Amino acid sequence: MTLFRLALALSALLLAGCKNNDIPDEIASIFVEASAASGGSMRQDVRLPVSQITITVMTKPLVPAEEILNTDAITSGDPDLRQEFLLVQLDRKAAIDVMNYTKEARGRRFVLIINDAAVGFMPIDQQIVNGNLMFHVEKKGLSNTEAVMDISRRLNISALKLRKLKEDERK
């Protein structure tokens, strides 16, 4: 979600009379790594906060914030190399979009961006058919486990607020 689109959405919510505590603090979206062939105006560079890895992503997210249902901390990897990952669960529409995209996107990465700042990435090794994405996340000053737990907690709060806003719109 671009900063302009985010500001516009939040302004509309404020004008509609929502209380400040109803507006999510973190807006997370999932972007895809840009191919070398994509045009310059369709690409932007993002940098992870700890490793300082720079990834060029498309400017439009594949999965916007409202399509993220839930997050959770999970442990994965070989027994001697286990680490914590952020599991991001998607709604049906986003799961289908991810399934279609990953069919031919091996070697690229998904990038998790919160409020215009990259916080994690996920290599695409195979087609993803279940709508569950596992991100390596990082946050300055926190260990891997602490970063996963903190980001998961904050994104779940935001996801609940977004669902409540969507329900209120339908009424």
Image: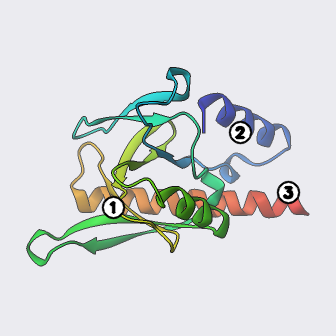
Q: CA gap, disc 3 to disc 1?
A: 38 Å
Q: Please provide percent x and percent y for residue 155.
A: 50, 57
Residue at the spot 37% in from the left edge and 48% down from the top edge: 108
Residue furthest out toward the right: 171
Q: Position of residue 27 (x, y in %)?
A: 57, 47
CA distance for labels 3 and 2: 14 Å
Image location (x, y in percent) of residue 99: 54, 64
Q: CA distance from mark 2 to mark 1?
A: 36 Å
Answer left or right for 28 relative to 122. Answer: right
Q: Residue furthest bottom?
A: 79
Say if residue 86 shows up in the picture: yes
Question: How dense is the environment of label 1, judged by Cα within 10 Å: few (below 14), some, or many (20 and up)?
Answer: few
The answer to whether residue 40 is left or right of residue 85 is right
Residue drawn at the location 43% of the way across and 62% of the way down: 152
Q: Amino acid at mark 3?
A: Glu
x 24%, y 35%: residue? 52
Q: Secondary structure at mark 3?
A: helix
User: Which residue occupies 20% across, 72% down?
Assistant: 77
- The residue to which callout 3 is attached is 169
Q: Which residue has dot 2 on it?
A: 10
Q: Pointer 1: what residue?
A: 125
Q: Amino acid at mark 1?
A: Asp
